[in-house]
Amino acid sequence: MVAVAASCDSGASAWTAARREAYANDQGANVSLIAVTARSNRQRSGQDLADWMPPSPDAQCRYVAERMSTKLRRHLTADD
């Protein structure tokens, strides 16, 4: 849920290459990988919550919760 580029801004830049690779391929939680359209993935890119949200209001709450879950699980920083 948190793009690798965004994770580096939240603390992953200090990780080893092996740890970043494991993060990028993480399948250890149901919220780690979500199927989306290519268009949606390109629009989101490495942006954070302040810059991009899913277009569907129904998906926004889930997106925020799952993104924060990933950050907490991986000990990444998060803005208020």
Image (cartoon, helix red, strand yellow):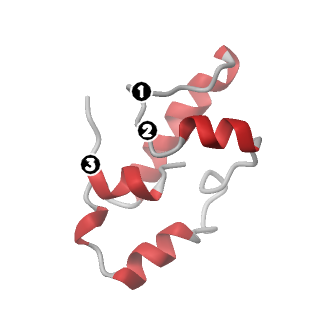
User: Where residue 53 sits in the image (x, y, percent)?
Assistant: 54, 25
Could you say which quadrant of the image residue 33 lies in? bottom right
Q: Amino acid at mark 3?
A: Thr
Is residue 51 left or right of 24 when viewed as pictured?
left
Q: Residues within 10 Å of mark 1 (few under 14, many from 20)?
A: few
Q: Residue at x 26, y 48 (%)?
A: 77
Residue bearing mark 3? 77
Element at badge 2?
loop
Residue at horizontal 50 percent and vertical 32 percent from the top: 64
Q: Is residue 28 in sight in this rendering?
A: yes
Could you give the CA–CA distance between mark 3 and mark 2, rounded to whole angstroms?
15 Å
**Contact check, label 1 and label 2, Cβ < 8 Å:** yes
Q: Which residue is mark 2?
A: 47
Kindly identify which residue carries mark 1: 51
Marks 3, 2: nearer the viewer: 2
| Quadrant assignment, res 25 | bottom right
Q: Which sits in the foreground, 46 or 70?
A: 46
Along the horizontal axis of the image, is 52 left or right of 10?
right
- Tell me the kind of residue under disc 2: Gln
Q: Residue at x 47, y 52 (%)?
A: 70
Question: Mark 3 or 1, which is nearer the eye?
Answer: 1
The answer to the question of whether label 3 and label 2 lie on touching residues, with beta carbons closer than 8 A, is no
Q: Please state which amino acid type lies under the numbered disc 1.
A: Asp
Closer to the N terminus: mark 3 or mark 1? 1
C-alpha distance separating marks 3 and 1:
17 Å
* Residue 20, horizontal then vertical, whole percent: 41, 73
